[in-house]
Every structure is written in structure tokens, then in C-alpha cells.
Amino acid sequence: MATPHRFLGCVLLGGLLLGASVLAQSPPKYGVGTTPTAEEIRAWDISIGPDGAELPPGRGTPKEGAQLFMSKGCAACHGANGTGGKAPELKSKDGPSVETWKRGRILPIRAPFATIVWDYINRAMPLGREGSLKPDEVYALTAFLLNLNEVIPEDSVLDAQSLPKVKMPIGEDYASLPDWKPKTRRLQGYPY
Amino acid sequence: MGSKRHSRRDLLKSGAALAGGLTLGAVAPSAGQTPAAGQAPKGPDMIRGSKELIAYGDRSRFVTSVRIPHGGRPSPDAFGLVFHVAAPLQDSVGVITPSSLHYVATTRGSFMPDIDPKEHRLMIHGLVDRPLTFTMEDLKRLPSVTRLHFIECAGNRSTPRAKNVQESHGMTSCAEWTGVLLSTLLKECGVKGAATWFVAEGVEEVKGASSMPVAKAMDDVLVAYGMNGEAVRPQQGFPLRLLVPGFEGIFSTKYVRRIKLVDRYYMNYNDYGHLRDDAKETALGYQVGPKSVITYPSAGQQLPGRGFYEISGLAWSGGGVIRRVEVSTDDGKHWMDAQIKGRAERMAHTRFGCPWNWDGKETVLLSRCTDELGQVQPTRAQVAKFFNVPVGEVPGLDNTIQPWRIASDGSVTNGHAT
């Protein structure tokens, strides 16, 4: 993630960004705004990228997750086994033999990276108490949902190292994203 | 609102109102009122002034146009979450959707956060030379822009079940947005060369986040605090909303609090939902295609009889300015150029009109538009042929032509219904 920087002898904001030295390269034009502290950035930076670089320390297993799924109230909305509740389905009705694209948009199945499952539980669950889960609990709930959908075995342990390595059912079987440029048609060759 | 609605109870007859010396501009008796048999002509009742009406005006009680929950999911739902709410395009005039009627969509169903703007912050960090945090006061010090822009939900898709244009096309609206260009803020932070994408994230409980190309940020993305001449409404992201012109509505992040510059597509929860197995379908997402719809006459309306009508509608495109709108009054056999009302602006609703003398016979009305990139709005049959799917299936965002069927009795219905 860290990229090489040329030292231009400007203001040094040491170690602010992912451990990299950050140098001012072009002066600000207006000088409006304040510099957040490293702690303030850490507190807000909940985006987990596909390589899991931002994942916090912690660990969890499917078994621990199964207990949390009941005790944290997940089952009340999503159904006892992630299915049949008022809230979105979390378990695919079809087994791994069915093509992933035909199994519905179920987060632990359709997401191309397991980090997305972790990120979403962490930022958006449980309803009304978002952000209250501890990292261990998010690892455990992620492990539970991935095991429930036969993505990882029951004896798996998920942590910052193993989670990004989980091979999701969809693999790389999705279309590459449009290379968007200003003033460009949506799809070259589309007659309309 | 509630107390204002009851103001009719306090209505006075014109003479009494004038004698009472109303401070609010009194409505003069209309000469056009039809007198009841054996009675003297009577003017309209008066709207009595009130502190509330002086402070913040209200529309006429005779104007009853309202939004509706969209797509069969209730808003608010069983959890009290707001999901999708459609704007009453059938009653629209001009190009600006009043803020109270602007369509609403949320990332998964959402509570509206009640944010004190004094406490709100926007942090920009990641692959920048200088991470910066801006207060609302900071942002209002910076050079501003004011632009008309439409927003359209990716789920704005006509179906044979749609009974009117609100159900078929109501998940789009257009407002005048005021704020700071995101490029202004990014230059203030100094974007590193490795930054190719950015993640925008809101304050709401889902912390809805989307990844977008930095090229878009530098082109025309707005960090908006103003909407239609006042502060952005809570349902639209008060106090601060990212406005991403021409992209699917979900990218216009509400309650925006954080922008992170990154070196790859970050594949957030909101992003993975955009993935498709067909690259053509994926390419027809993101940037909204050229789209138009006739709002008058449209399904659910009733023509009083044969004779002259000005057909009226809206056209828009994520590709930029609408260059041309054509209308057919004979189900596509002939097309004529519609008149563009006012000035067409890029990524904004554009009002068009077209004179029509209805001969009282059954027919079908159509409209299609062309944008500045030369993209033309297709029929459903054309889309089906391109994708080799049954007619009616529309992969990608639906920007197909909407037919409205006129019956000989003047009733108007959805041409997609069989």
C-alpha cells in the first residue's frame, strides 16, 4: 500500500498514513481545514480493502459466531439459521453445485472478497447498535456465515491474515469494471 | 405542517377578511367563480395569515401531489427504516423537483440521522499529501458552484405493472445543488499519483460507502450543502451530500463524512452489488444512459376530449447535455423534434414540449432523446436484440422508451402492459 515518496523538503507529517512518511508536494491554495490526528483517522477509517490491510487484530471461529448470532440478536431478524427472517437472507438455499450467479445476491456467497462480509458486519450491524461489535466478534460472525454457506470448514480460524485469503465461491467470475472516463459513451460498440 | 393544514378552518369570507386588515396578501375575489343558482357571485375563501405561514410558506390545499413508497417495499418499513420513495413526475412542471417531493432512496433502508451541522466534519485522507478535516464553516469559505443536476436510482425501471409515471419513472428528480467542487478539496489535500479510486462514506447507521474513480472526482463531483436555495434536506443528506453527476444515485453519498483516496477499487458492500457476470451489462451501469419520458399525457391521466394538447416531458442523460428530443404520436411510425424548454444543462432534467392535435383515435405516444455524446435512447426491442434476450428484459440500467397508450375515450395507460 505504501508508495515511494520524493523528499521535497516541505512539511513532514511523520507516520500519519499507514506508516509512510507524507510530504507536502504542492502547497494548499486556500489553507482552509485542519489536519486530523493519526488517532482521529484511525477511529474513522473503517474501510477494509480487498487485501485486508486495515483489518484490526482479533480472531474468531464459526462456532463462536454461531453463539453470537443468537446472543447478539442477529437471528431475531435474519432467522435462526440466516434464513426465513424479515431481514435479508444470509444463507443460500442452493448448495455449492449451483452456479454462484444463480444463487441470489447473498452477501457471504456473492461477495468476491471475504473482507466485504467483515466490513459490512462491522459498519452496519446489528441494526440500531452499529459499530458496537468488537473485532473478535466480527471475525467470529464472518466465520459463522462463511461456514454456514460452505465456504470455509467448521474448524477455521479467521483473523487479519487468514480472512483476506479466503477463496470466495465467485472467484474471479465477474465482469471487469468499466474504465470510466469523462465524456465517454457507456459501452463502446453499443448502438444506442 | 399539521397546524398549517388546518388553516382552512380559520378561513374568513372576503369582506370580513379585508375588514379585519389581514397582513398576508389577501386573495382578490375571482371573477370566474360560478355562482350557485339564486345566489350572488361568491369569491374564493381567504387564507388567513399565521406566524407559521409568514415564516415558512405552504402550498395551496388544492395541490395534493405527494411521493409514494416505491417498488412494493413500504417506507417506513416494519423496522421504521425508509427505503425507496418515488417523486410525482406526473404533476411536475419545469425541471426542478421541489425538495419536499424529491425522490428518496437509501442504501439498505435507513433511519434519517438528525445531524447538528456544527458537529459535522468531512475528513479526506488516504493517498494524499495532507489529510484534512473540514467543518461546514470551512466548506462555506471556499469557492462554491451552483448547478442543476438530476439524480436517478439504478432501480428506476418501468414494468408492465406501473400504473403511472410515478411508479415507472419516479425514482429520479432534479434540483439545484450548491457546494464546493470535490476537486477543490482534493487539490487542497494534494492527491498522490498512486490514487486511482476514492471511497465516500456517510454518517448514517449503515455508513454507506461507494468506490468511484478519481477521474470522476476531478471532473465534476460536488460536495453539496445547498439544495434549491436552502440547506440540503435530511432525507437528501443534510448537512452534506456528495453529488456525483450522471452516475447511479447510490454514488451520491448522503451525510458524507469521509473520503479516502485509495489505489484500487475498494469493493465495499455498496460496490459488490454492482458486479455482474456480463461485461456489457456492467458497462451499462454507473453512468446513466440517455432517457426521456412523457409526463403529460401519461398513464393514469384522462384527456378531456379531442383537440390541442402540448405533450410535455423530461429528458436526461449521464453522458452530458440533452441535444435532441423526438416525439412520436403514432407509436413510432413518424417522429418529430420536440422543443427544448429553457436551456438544456449537463446531467440535468431537460423539459421538452411538442404540440399535438388529438383526433380522438386510439394511439401510442413515445419520446426518445439523444445526448451530446450521440447516445440515443433505445426501444425495449432494440435492447432485447442487442443482448439476445426476450423483449421486456433490460440488462443494465433501464433507459428504454416508455410507450403511453391513448384509448379513444381519452384514458391513458402503460403501453408495456398487455
Image: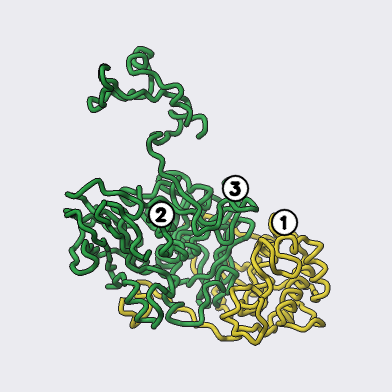
Chain colours: A yellow, B green
The x and y percentages for residue B280 are 42, 81
User: What subunit carries mark 2?
Assistant: B
Mark 3: give few (<14), some (14-19) or many (20+) Cα within 10 Å.
some
Residue topped by disc 1: A129
Residue pointed to by mark 3: B115
Figure quadrant of residue B130: bottom right
Q: Give the chain letter at badge 1.
A: A
Residue closest to the eye, B260 or B50: B50
Nearer to me, B361 or B228 = B361
Q: Which residue is mark 2?
A: B166
Residue in the picture at 38% in, 56% down: B165
Disc 2 to disc 3, C-alpha distance: 30 Å
- Disc 3 marks a residue whose amino acid type is Ile
Marks 2 and 1 sit apart, C-alpha to C-alpha, by 35 Å
Residue B367, image quadrant: bottom left
How far separated are the C-alphas under marks 3 and 1? 17 Å
